[in-house]
Image: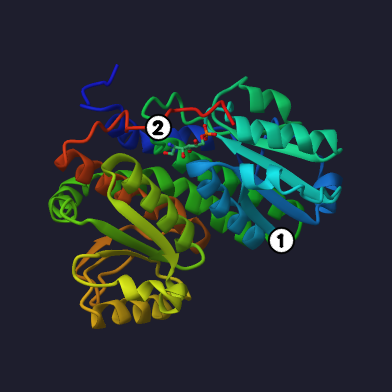
Amino acid sequence: DMGGHDTYMHKEISEQADAVDRVLRGRIDDRFSTVHLGGLNLDPREARAIRRVKILGCGTSYHAGQIGAQMIEELARIPSDAEPASEFRYRNPVVDPDTLYIAVSQSGETYDVLAAVQELKRKGARVLGVVNVVGSAIARETHGGVYVHAGPEVCVVSTKCFTNTVVAFGLLALHLGRIRDLSVADGKRIIEGLRKLPGQIQEILAMEDEVKQLAAEYAEARSMMFIGRVRGYPVAREASLKLKEISYIHAEAYPASELKHGPLALIEPAMPTVAIVPDDDLLEKNRAAMEEIKARSGRILAVAHQKQDKADHTIVVPKNENELDPILMGIPLQLLAYHVALAMGRDIDKPRNLAKSVTVE
Ligand code: M6R
């Protein structure tokens, strides 16, 4: 049932405020400025003993994991990174007893992720899951974890589950942070930010007409560039994947700083750039990157917290805490991918060559 929407993708994009409400519900503990995660199965002594975090997933879940790794590193100060689950399992990784491994999956059935979990367990590692489908193979195989509670996602391209997965990582990062060295004041600040998310998501969804108008222009592009730095980079990668999957327009995502090391050669009027420009300590750096693109007559669409004069158009999104901004900045780009694909007449819920869950190697 599409509930009055023309596609599941549109329905699922539109449901995100409610979905985020669900992942937060019952978990916030104002008294200690932390969150309760019932199924984590990790006591405070164990949480304090973690020396590294390694996050494994595929596709969109991998991108959510990249943001998650940054959140855990920032809030809990544990060195963290994300890697595609398939790369990890094929490179005979060193499995370290002081590392916490986290498997991320919407379906909980992705074979590469499941196989990575099984290999890790065989070697004695501790593995948690950040999973949407309750009781799925990965949920059962992991030692504990955080359910994402996005609800059923039908469209092959993931939208609401991406957002909820990143919020679930925000909760996990806050939880680990408060057991370690995150102050009460910072805990409070993050909780306030989390509580603002559903309302801010509604504000972004209300900009759909503006995004739709832009889409007509971008549906003409043969290729697009997505750039961001640090917190904005995984957002750029995910937005680039969304566009590719449903519009079949070629898209690349690069850290803004890497442009001058090669991809700047691609910039010309027919190769528009989408720039993720949060109002944080890297704002000036991002402005400089946009200036370089403008100097090569590239067109720029910025997603930012204030109007960018270097960009041809800015989608202005509401500001949250710096650490939580990535949760919101991708949402207008889900709408952009959707409307570009719609303008091109694509089969949005079932893009060619793709399956919702990839249960084979
Ligand atoms: O169910 P999972 O989260 O494990 O699936 C992982 C990927 O196959 C999935 O995210 C894929 O990239 C989607 N088509 C993204 O929209």
Q: Nearer the viewer, residue 351 or 3?
A: 351
Q: What element carries label 2?
A: loop
Which circle marks residue 354 in the picture?
2
Mark with earlier residue (1, 2): 1
Question: Looking at the image, which residue is at 53% across and 38% down?
Answer: 24
Question: Looking at the image, which residue is at 45% across and 43% down?
Answer: 163
Horizontal arrangement in the rendering, residue 239 relative to residue 234 (left or right)? left
Residue 15 placement: quadrant: top left
Q: Which of 28 and 94 is in front in this view?
A: 94
Whether pointer 1 and pointer 2 mark residues with C-beta atoms closer than 8 Å, the reply is no
| Quadrant the C terminus occupies | top right
CA neighbours of label 1 inside 10 A, class few (<14), some (14 to 19), many (20+): some
Which circle marks residue 152 in the picture?
none
Question: Looking at the image, which residue is at 39% across and 33% down?
Answer: 18
CA neighbours of label 2 inside 10 A, class few (<14), some (14 to 19), many (20+): few
Amino acid at pointer 2: Leu
Distance, label 1 to label 2, CA atoms, is 34 Å
Q: Which of 211 and 97 is in front in this view?
A: 97
Residue 17 placement: quadrant: top left
Rendered location of residue 332, percent (x, y): 30, 50
Is 348 located above or below residue 135 in the figure?
below
Q: Does the residue labelled 2 lie within 8 Å of ligand 1?
A: yes
Is 183 located above or below residue 239 in the figure?
below
Amino acid at pointer 1: Pro
Residue 280 placement: quadrant: bottom left
**In this rendering, does residue 146 appear at all?**
no
Horizontal arrangement in the rendering, residue 176 relative to residue 150 (left or right)? right
Rendered location of residue 52, percent (x, y): 76, 55
Rendered location of residue 6, percent (x, y): 20, 26
Instruction: Please name the residue that numbered disc 1 is placed on.
Output: 79
Is 347 located above or below residue 169 in the figure?
above
